[in-house]
Image (cartoon, rainbow, N blue to C red):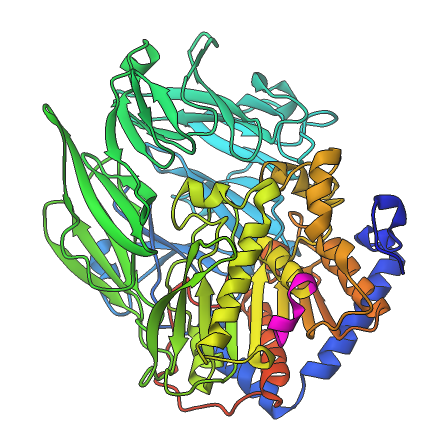
Amino acid sequence: MARLTDEGDDPYLWLEDLDGPDAAGWVRDRNAETVAALTGGEAFAGLQTEIRQVLDAEDRIPYPGWRGDQLYYNFWTDATHPRGMWRRTTLDQYRRAEPEWDVLLDVDALAAEEGENWVWQEVTVLRPGYERCLISLSRGGADAVVVREFDLGRRAFVEDGFTLPEAKSDVCWIDADHIYVGTDFGPRSLTSSGYPRLAKRWRRGTALSAAEVVYEGQADDIGVYASHDPTPGFERDFVGRGLDFYRTENYLLTDAGERTRIAVPEDAQWDVHREWLLIRLRSPWTVGGATHPAGALLATRFDAFLAGGRELAVLFRPDDRTALSYHFWTRNHLILTTLADVKSRLEVLTPGETGWRRKPLADVQEFEHSRIVVTDPDHSDAYLLASEGFLQPATLRLGQVGGAVETLKREPAFFDADGLVVRQCFATSADGTRVPYFVVGDPGAPGGPTLLTGYGGYEISLTPDYDGVIGRGWLARGGTYVVANIRGGGEYGPEWHRAAMRENRPRAYEDFAAVAAELVARGITTPARLGIEGGSNGGLLMGVMLTRYPSLFGAVIAHVPVLDMRRYHRLLAGASWMAEYGDPDREVDWAFLREYSPYHNVRGDRPYPPVLFITSTRDDRVHPGHARKMAARLREHGHDVSYYENVEGGHGAAANNEQHVFISALTLEFLWRKLAGQPHAPLPRQVSTGATGERTGRRIWR
């Protein structure tokens, strides 16, 4: 078949029909082929058992959230509760090895009672008061949710309370009797990206149709929002719209409904805490006689800024090696986490009469990565800190800025790490750029099976973490694991991201190829034994590696991938990504997109490594048609392609641990067969049948 050039040339458009009989039949046939080829027998069952011990272990860290009422909230899944339960306890109980938990909602019991495939998504608690909340549940793990009001005291849903049918909704409490809501209100109420175009104020006891519009966006916006800050003495309301994935227009909303523009750059991130306004720049900003670089963090008093004042304190200024990762407020302090060559550093900044004082966050352990889990900015200067590494199970610690730090929980080891080491190396990309990557494995076992992963988009950083499934299923069996920190990510701030946006996207692919080539040059592996894996935007990365750099790899796995760059903006949420990739309807943009669009660059006369696509019918972010069509086109040309589509799971491709276990085992089995020429390496002795924290396990792809 000739090269695809436009939508009219696409012979597989019918596979975009989500539940059409022909498409559904095609999916069933491909699933059956893959399951028959890769599963079955005692070995695969044993691999699943090993992975399940990781994901369902009772002694993993129950990472908590704080809601402002001094209680520790946690959503927990295990073998008995595969859908999970939302629960809470006190600090004294949480300190114990086996705390007594107050179960607020059992999602398994609810699903059985209502005959629904409920998957927990999120919760918004009314503050202050903490007596009511809005719980979001999805069917099968989709982004679209059903919202229902819940009484925390009675542990029951509120009859005739705030309830929204299934949609991509956004809700925020104003007070006990009012909420802001953005949802599907009917015709013309959504943007072209499928998100709310209208934000309304909804009063208890009235119909949703009677809710008052407080802000309205345009059809080609990403979406709109309305939010309320209930901080006593600093109560404020905000509205705004997303112009694209990175640019927003924001306003302070008065009681009279008037809007005052918050005049920060459109592409800047900002937030307000009490009297303070923080501004995080994505591009240089000249203001008040000074030019601040992209990646800087600025602070000023909110009211003064709205009145025209431009006295900005510089809290962080990036350099060639260091970027701001994120920040958290406590009641009186600001905690900054920065990345220096992808290694975390934490500082505490405190405003005072003469400026901002700074000092390192006390007693941060010497791990490869530490992260703030939660703070309590309304009431205290407490924080929770998790520290971990590729080979170091996590430790969860409770600290008080300026005070003591205590260890609350330790994650047990999952696999024997003796003889394994972590090395950080730097490859040189095609244009001379220095690209960092981490190598995890046995340095005395060169040339073995190696799994390389990356993402390279949306300013998202890949940092070291303890992954029990990778540990048991790959490292402990003799594999080497590599994480590439390529351009497009956030490892070195906005400029690192911008270097691989739109027409510069190929720089990310050149970076990844450079890492792959260096792994071979260093003798760590060989092309035939080098496998790669990525999801979502990382799935696009995998598709490009398959079609542009096939000789570098022995196997490719793409999860929930974006692959058709001609039609991505017409499928589900794809229109919201055009700031990242470009607009295929503009000739100048399609000129560079078609050069790397994996679906449009499949060749029958070029050998490709074996590839496995994994997606979900219920993914309402990245359409499964991307993976379906790519697999069909590769099959047409006689390439070695495997395909598995879960019927639920949303963008994570799995709705519960049972599905996570199956997909993880499927991918590991595929890799061992293709890279080592055997079903999988023998199961080694494991350190513990205990497991890891909530973040352990296969990545949930963005």
Q: Residue at x 17, y 49 (%)?
A: 361
Image quadrant where residue 54 sits: bottom left
Q: Where residue 496 sits in the image (x, y, percent)?
A: 44, 46
Figure label count: 0
In the picture shown, does residue 508 fall above or below 323? below
The percent coordinates of residue 209 (x first, y second) are: 65, 22
Q: Quadrant of residue 692?
A: bottom left
In the visual, does 348 lie left or right of 264?
left
Residue 549 in magenta?
Answer: yes
Q: Measured from the top left, where is residue 568 in percent x and y?
A: 71, 45
Nearer to us in this view, 517 or 690: 517
**Going by the image, does 568 lie left or right of 44?**
right
**Magenta range:** 547-555
- Residue sitting at x 42%, y 45%: 154
Q: In the rendered image of this protein, does residue 372 appear above or below residue 198?
A: below
Q: Quadrant of the N terminus?
A: bottom right
When asked about the image quadrant of residue 44, the answer is bottom right
Position of residue 37 in the picture relative to residue 113 (left or right): right
129 w.r.t. 98: above or below: above
x 50%, y 53%: residue: 431
Residue 358 lies, in percent from the top left, at: 15, 39
Compared with 401, 634 (above or below) is below
Q: Is residue 565 visible?
A: no
**Is residue 592 inside the magenta stretch?**
no
Q: For residue 411, say whether it is visible.
A: yes
In-front residue for pair 625/382: 625
